[in-house]
Amino acid sequence: MKGVPHFTKDGTLHTGGTHKMPNGELHTGASHNKDSQKLFHFDDLSPAAKKKASSQRAAKKNAPKKVAKKKVAKKKVAKKKESFPEAVERRMRGQ
């Protein structure tokens, strides 16, 4: 599932790239290689791995969050409404 944390078998939080195997399993790395490891959801980990994963999740929650810059709204300049004949004239002049 996207948007949920994934962990290696020992409970280490994985934050890098992932790929899905033909059998549906999620593995580490953008593409499969000899170093790829199967990834698990928290509920699928062993009790020892859950303990390690819990400490990592708590540390991540307590980490300082990035402050997003406020987006400054651009002022819209009100355009003068032109009449139909004015619009035709403007187009005829090529503006």
Image (cartoon, grey):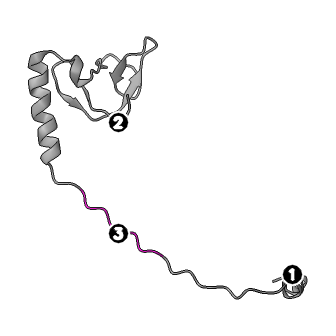
Quadrant hosting residue 37: top left
- For mark 3, does the 10 Å Cα neighbourhood hold few (<14), some (14 to 19), or many (20 or more) residues? few
> Which secondary structure lies at badge 3?
loop
Query: Is 16 placed above or below 51 here?
Result: below
- Total tally of numbered discs in the picture: 3
Is residue 78 or residue 55 the one in the foreground?
78
Q: Amino acid at mark 2?
A: Gly
Closer to the observer: label 1 or label 2? Answer: 2
Residue at screen point 56% across, 80% down:
76
* 71 relative to 83 in the view: left or right: left
Q: Residues within 10 Å of mark 2 (few under 14, many from 20)?
A: few
Of the pair 42 and 18, the residue shown nearer to us: 42
Tell me the distance, in whole angstroms, between the alpha carbons under discs 3 and 1.
40 Å
Residue 28 horizontal/vertical position (percent): 32, 25
Give left or right: position of 44 versus 36.
Answer: left
Magenta-drawn stretch contains 18: no
Tell me which numbered mark, 1 or 2, is placed earlier along the sequence. 2
Q: Is residue 70 magenta?
A: yes
| Residue at disc 1, secondary structure | helix
Q: Mark 1 = which residue?
A: 91
Q: In the rendered image, which quarter contains the C terminus?
A: bottom right
The residue indicated by pointer 3 is 70
The residue lying toward the viewer, choosing from 24 and 36, is 24
Check disc 2 and report the residue beneath it. Answer: 3
In the figure, residue 68 lies in which quadrant? bottom left
- Badge 1 crowding class, 10 Å Cα cut-off, few under 14, some 14 to 19, many 20 or more, is few
Amino acid type assigned to the residue bearing label 1 in the image? Arg
Label 1 vs label 2: CA separation?
A: 51 Å
Residue 75 sits above or below residue 27 on the image: below
